[in-house]
Each structure stands twice: as C-alpha cells, then as structure tokens.
Image: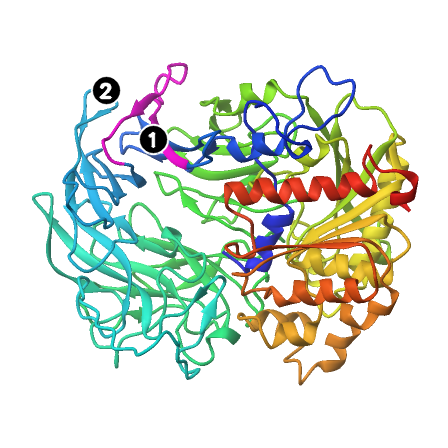
Amino acid sequence: MGHPFLKAAALVIACFAAAAPLAADSHAEAAPVPGLTKPAMSARDLVTMPRLGAPIVTRDERYAVYSVTLTDPDTLERAPAHYVPDLSRPESAPRPIEFAQPAHSLAFGPDDSLYFLSDAHPDPAAESRSRLWRAPMVGPGGFAEPDIVAEFEHTDIAGYLLAPNGNAVALMAQLPRECPRFDCEIEDDTLGTGRLYDGEAGFYRHWDTWAKPGRYNRVFVFDIEDGALAGDGTPIDGRDPATGVTGHVPTMPFGGLDDLAWLPDGSGLFFAMREAGAGEPLSTDLDIYFSDLSGDAPQVLTGDNPAYDSTPAVSHDGNFLAYLAMERPGYESDRRTIMLRDIEIGTTRAVTADIDLSFGSIAWDPMGRFLYATAPQVLDTPVFRIDPRSGEIRRMDLIAGNEAHIGNVIPLQRDRLLFTRDSIGSPAELFIAEVDQQGKPLTDIVTTRMGGMASTITTRFSFAGAEDQTVHGQITRLENQTGPIPAILYIHGGPQGTFNDAWSSRWNPRVLASQGYAVISVDFHGSVGYGQDFTDAINRDWGGKPLVDLQKGLSAALDLDPQIDGSRACAMGASYGGYMVNWIAGNWSDRFDCLVQHDGLFDLRSFYYSTEELWFPRWDFGGSYAAARQTYERWNPVNYVQKWNTPMLVVTGEKDFRVPYTQGLQSFTALQERSIPSQLLVFPDENHWVLGAENSLQWHRTVFNWLDQWIGPKASDETAE
C-alpha cells in the first residue's frame, strides 16, 4: 500500500464526492458565485455523494455485484447498498440485494453463492459479533436468505478469503501469537489502564492505533464441509511461535486481501508479511511466504531481497506467482517492479524491469496469457497489459480523452475488462470494455447527479521547473466563471505522491473550485508518475527543488489563464503539503494572503522522535536525526519562524500518530507568539485524515470561511492585506 505519507497524497491529491444539491445552511455548503445557471457543488454534496466500491464477478461472468455507500442527508449516517448488474445485458437495470442484515466484504463462491460479513443476527438476544454468511443464488441474479457459515464465541472475524475451489476459507482476526486456534479465549490480567511496552515487539503505536502487546493480525484456514467450517483452523504463520513467523497478515496499517493469494486447488496460500520485532519501525522488508496449510512454519520465498515484496497474484493454472518488488531497503517509494516466479521450479525474473513505471495492482486474465496492472503516468493512472513471456507492455486506452484514474480492474473472458474510472470532475462509475475499444459505463451512481451542478473544467499544463526539467500541473475552476478569480495553490502530500486526475473523499479540487476559486496543483520534484529519478529527486531536498517547482508552477498557471487573479492567493496543503506550507511561511513569506496547514511538519527534530514508521525520515533525510542532524535542520521549518507573517489556519487530528498533533500545536504557538492572525482546528477523533461526515462539514466550513476572510468575495482590502 505504501507509506501513509504517500496516502496523504491521497489526502492532498484527494478529491471529494458530491450529491444532488441540498438546501444550504451556510456558505460552507453553497458557494455564492454569481452568474451560475446551475447550483455549485457544496461541501454537503461532497459528503453525501454515493460512493462506489470495488465490483466482484460470478465464475461464469454473467453477473457482478457492486456496493454503494449511501449517506443519509439529514443524519449523515452511512450504510452500504448492493446491486447485481447482468453483464450479458449491460443496458438492463441492476437488481438490488435486500438482506435482513447489513452486509459488507462481499465475495462469490465457485457455485455463485454470495458470501459476506455482518455483525447482525436474526436473534435480537445474540451478541453483536462479526460472522460469515452465505446466500445461494436463486433465479437470474437473485439470492436466497443467507445462513451463517462461521461464528465464534470469543473471536470476531475481521476478514476472509475463499479458496477458488470453495473447499476452504482463510479467516482473519487480531490474536495473540500463542493462540493455536482461531477461537481463542484471551485473558487480560493487566492492572490499571497503562500500556507497557519494552520495544522488542516493534511498533508500540501505528497510524492511529496503540498496539496491544502480543496481538497480531493472523490468518487461520478452515476446510468447508457441507456449508460449515471443520476443525479449529490451521494458522498460516505456524502453530509453534518458536519455529514459525510473527507479524501482521494482513499488513499494518493498510493491508488487505491483496496481501494473500490461494493456489487454485486450495492446497496452499501465499501471503505478504513484515516480521515483527524491535527493527520493524525501521524496515520496509516485506516478504512473500507460502503456507502448505500443514501448520508447520511457512516457507519464505523472497528472503534474498531485503526490500519490499508484496501483492501476490497466482495464475489461474497455478503455474506462476506474480508479485511487486522494490530494490532498495528502507525506501517505501522505490519503483515497484512486477516479478514472475515459476512455482514448480522456483526461478524468478523481473517482467517490467525495462519500463520506468511503478505498478500498484496486478490481475491475471482468465487464460493466463496476460497480466493487467495499473501505474501512475503523468497525471493519469491507466491500466497496462503485460505479456509475461515476451515482456511486451501495452497501455490500454479505455476512455476517450484522459484516462484519469482507472482502478478495480477485473479481466474477463473474450478480452474484456471490468473496471472503475473516476476523475477530478466526477466520482467513480463502473465500466466494461473490450480490448482496443472504448469502455462503456454500466452504472450511473453519480453521473446524472453531477450533471445537475455547475460544471468545472480542469486544464493540464507543463513548464520548465527546477533544473529546467519538465514539471506538470492542473488548474480546476468553474467552467463559465470570468475573472478575477482568486487563486489557491494546492500542495500534495507524500511527498512521493501526485495531484493526479482522480476523485476521492478529501481535499477535492472541484468542491473548492465550486466556491469560486481557481485551484492550481503542481506535481513537483518527488511526485510519482514521471519516472523513478524524478521521484527520487526530493530525497534530502525537501525545501529545495519542490519549492522552486511550486513558484514556477504558480507563475506558469497565472500566465496560462488570465482570468486568475494572482494578487489574491492562498496556499494549502496536508502532510508533506502541510510541511511545505510551514516552509513557505518562512521561505516565500511575501507571496500569499493566507495559508492553510493540515497535519504538517513544523519541527523535524521533534517529529523524528515521535513518529512511528522511522524508515521514512531515515530515508528522506539520510539517517536518524542524530546521524543526519545537519540535513534535518537545513529543511526544518521551525528555524525560519522569525520570518513568518502570513495568516494561517492550522488543522490537526489527535489520533494522528504519523504527524503527531503536537506539530500543529507548535505551529499555532509560533503564530500566536508573533501575533499573526491564526486559527487552530483540532479533531479529537480523527487521524491523519478527516473521515467523519460531520467533521468533514466542519472542516469545509472552517476552511471556506478562512478563505473568504482573506481572499474571497467578502474580503475587504484591509483584511486581505
């Protein structure tokens, strides 16, 4: 999954969803932009927009199921809904699935029965606990009432992966390493509320969660006999902790089902894991293991590579294992190369070594002829078809115009692909395409709804950035708006991330542009999608080339679009983007009327000693703080506080362990001591991202009011200075 600093690129890259315009109760939910013939998208639209999930497909490929997360416009409570489209009749309306209990984590068995997890139970007296259910398919795309396949007295099922032949299932839960069976009764003899750590177990906290000493994400495999589980389950990490392996499967904090892969006959399971221990916060060394389901210690397959190996994918004939690998230990943003292992012989070769792309997903076609994989490439995330025999790599242009962001790719028979596509302009819809033909939409989850709102346009541009290298960017603004339009410089996180053409549920350029601003983003040195050398260029240069790129990129955007008013401008960013806002405050202090800094690094020394994944700063700054103090201090925003003079809004979450919230408190203290107009917004229940619906509305209301005060249509000459 990469480092959540990289995910914070998803935060700053990010984009928000939108729903049918609702009655607004503040400027935060409806922008007063004159001259619009349709309502502008609001923050409430964004928060309540239906969100499409990944599809699944029956074995005969006639039916799919996709899930949509719906948000109640009044209560803001979220719940999933599920639909069954007939892929043989793409023009037909999808059929809703209506079970008595809420369902999530859906998967098809080989007989096209639908499996899912649910905490509900028909007996109201039953304890709320995650159980595995199964609903047989009846009729054309219909399902019978589900029955329970697996439930346990002591253990919640956190996830599952069915064997392709349906005779076994891998169940996941957080359990002590000593537990020999899945339904393990855990005794807690701790006195008081204190947590005691000795450092030998690795992470004592990670992302937004304090570690429970001795507990790990673990996987047990059960046979399925007559629709029910058999036995106590076999741990894939080995029954004996002394001879087996210890770590989290799925990996923490963002691992999922792509960390595991079955052999087609269900006789073994591949999985990715980083061994736990004192060195875990310093290591990016994930390895691929194989369990023969005997309960013995699993076999490590990639032990010769001290860097990242993950995302196992087995060909449908069981002959080959594809996976992603990096070369450099300790670097989470190294190029991800697709490797191919002959399972019987044991030989491995790099399939994509000769192309400068970093792949993020792998899927085999049903015949085993090709691999399909996605990778960022100059503001797009297209899908590539890879011939594992010849090494030929071909970009599949599936959408007229820009590919934008392609995801959730499922190769089908007859050279067809099922996939989702989203962009800055619109959230994800489900598409189907034949090779060499344009994709056709199968859903209208949000497209019609988006058409009822004032449209925005996104213009791509490039310019000569730092060291005269080509740098790319985008401008998003209302389509028919005339100037002067205040400018927002959006700065992505990562820093090895991108502000690509994609939609998400945070920091959406469209929703901000709909308030009457021109949103300018620049993929500065360090961004992904432009070759590994470009990504590596930010190493030990956090405030150097990226700042030059942002300065030149802003000028290039203003030259390109004369409607944008560069004299009214604000810079915004989160994670690394928040760091850059702090850096700008002291190193480009006369350019902006205001700043918005979210989860940004203020003091690199205190950051190093309080963050959790220490491999990240050690790689980007050349070692520990003690070993590379000069580099840390060279790019440390706290050293330039005496030059701060720009009004700043600071946002932070108390559950953020990546950039601890005290970094935000320090920024605010510095602003207050210098009597600089400033505000501090603290979310006690959010981590590195703002995920709650009400919190998202509060975030937008606060940010929009701040922008209004300094550069918006309500800003007076006095407050704008």
Residue 381 image-quadrant placement: top right
- Please report the bounds of the magenta region as a residue range: 78-101
Report the residue at 69% width, 32% height from top: 27
**Residue 413 coordinates in the image, percent (x, y):** 36, 31
Which mark is on residue 543?
none
- The residue located at (76%, 42%) in the rendering is 707
Q: Amino acid at mark 1?
A: Val
| Residue 538 visible | no
Amino acid type for the residue under numbered disc 2: Pro
Q: Which residue does the image show at 82% across and 34% down from the upper left?
A: 714
Q: Which residue is mark 2?
A: 140
Residue 72 position, x and y percent, is 44, 30
Q: Nearer the viewer, residue 33 or 270?
A: 33
Q: Nearer the viewer, residue 75 or 20?
A: 75
Q: Is residue 34 above or below residue 553?
A: above
How far apart marks 2 and 1 lie (CA) works out to 13 Å
The residue singled out by tag 1 in the image is 65
| Image point (55%, 45%), residue name | 695
Magenta stretch encompasses residue 100: yes
Residue 247 among magenta residues: no
Vertical position of residue 540 compared to residue 549: above or below: below
Crowding near pointer 2: few (<14 within 10 Å), some, many (20+)?
few
Residue 674: percent from the left, percent from the top?
83, 65
Q: Is residue 474 left or right of residue 568?
A: left
